[in-house]
Amino acid sequence: MPGLGGRGLWLGPAVAVAAAMAAWLMGWWSPRADFRLFIPEELARYRGRPGDPGLYLALLGRVYDVSSGRRHYEPGAHYSGFAGRDASRAFVTGDYSEAGLVDDVSDLSFSEMLTLQNWLSFYEKNYKFIGRVIGRFYGEDGLPTPELTQAEAMMTKGLEADRQELIEKQRFPPCNAEWSFIRGSRFWCSQQSGGVSRDWIGVPRKLFKPGVKPHCVCVRTTGPPSDQSPENPTHRNRGDLDHPNLGEYPGCPPLAITCSVPL
């Protein structure tokens, strides 16, 4: 079980994966005839204790048979608190107390809901789906409640936010960086900096975003800007250097691929 807790750019596959994940996510909530409905008290009997009928857990109201992973969930195991209940919140928070092993995810962020989506993928792939829990996420008819619809919307928005973040990272890859008590900070760009493979190097710039501390990114210096409209083919051959959210580092040559910022 896993631990809890522009041009020359390779972007297409990642966007396709995000779109496929979103479509799969929506398919999870579709009605199915081959599932059981549990009330929480009934699910609580499936904790893998001697005499219990099985070893189940629920995530966002979906029940999975985790008997094949017994060593993770049986009494005394590290994740035993997840057995026999829906403890969706704890998959994100890591709070294994009784107060934390609950199904309330209403105040989780987009990124935290995306973590839950990743856990759903894990259980769908590795364990057998058994049924649904009547309560927060499913009604007595086995159909999704408004809370589940909200959770689904949060996951979809999380996927979109993730996609947008990836697009920005491909456009403005993080710089390589090092710091010395004597020399201060040094930033530099390469075709692999920030973990983003590309066919250009770029130059260091400060990227400013609301609510976020400015950080160093590598900026393409030639060709049209990444956001240029196809209807306007003329450009100044400066790449993304004129983006309004970028700033130069004082004392660094504008087109140098390395920049030192003394203390």
Image: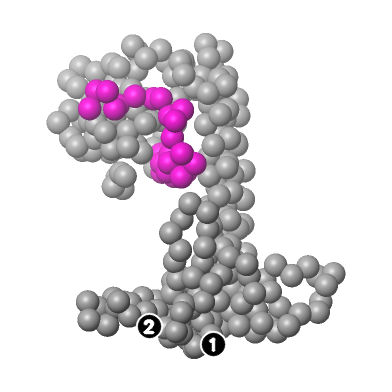
Picture residue at 46% right of the left edge, 55% below the top:
212
Q: Residues within 10 Å of mark 2 (few under 14, many from 20)?
A: some
Q: Is residue 39 visible?
A: yes
Image quarter of the C terminus = bottom left
Picture residue at 44% right of the left edge, 84% below the top:
251
Label 2 sits on what residue type?
A: Ser
Give above or below for 69 relative to 159.
above
Q: Which residues are magenta?
A: 97-124
Picture residue at 53% right of the left edge, 23% below the top:
147
> Per the image, is 261 magenta?
no
Separation of disc 1 and disc 2 at Cα? 13 Å
Mark linked to residue 260: 2
Picture residue at 57% right of the left edge, 42% below the top:
157
Image quarter of the N terminus = top left
Kindly identify which residue carries mark 1: 255
SS for dot 1: loop
Q: Nearer the viewer, residue 224 or 100?
A: 224
Q: Earlier in the sequence, mark 1 or mark 2?
A: 1
Question: Residue 194 appears at what percent x and percent y?
Answer: 44, 71
Q: Nearer the viewer, residue 22 or 30?
A: 22
Q: Is 79 on the left or on the right of 29, as rendered?
A: left
> Per the image, is 110 magenta?
yes
Question: Residue 98 appears at what percent x and percent y?
Answer: 24, 23
Q: Nearer the viewer, residue 158 or 62?
A: 158
Question: Residue 169 appears at what percent x and percent y?
Answer: 52, 65
SS for dot 2: strand
Q: Quadrant of residue 153?
A: top right
Q: Quadrant of residue 154?
A: top right
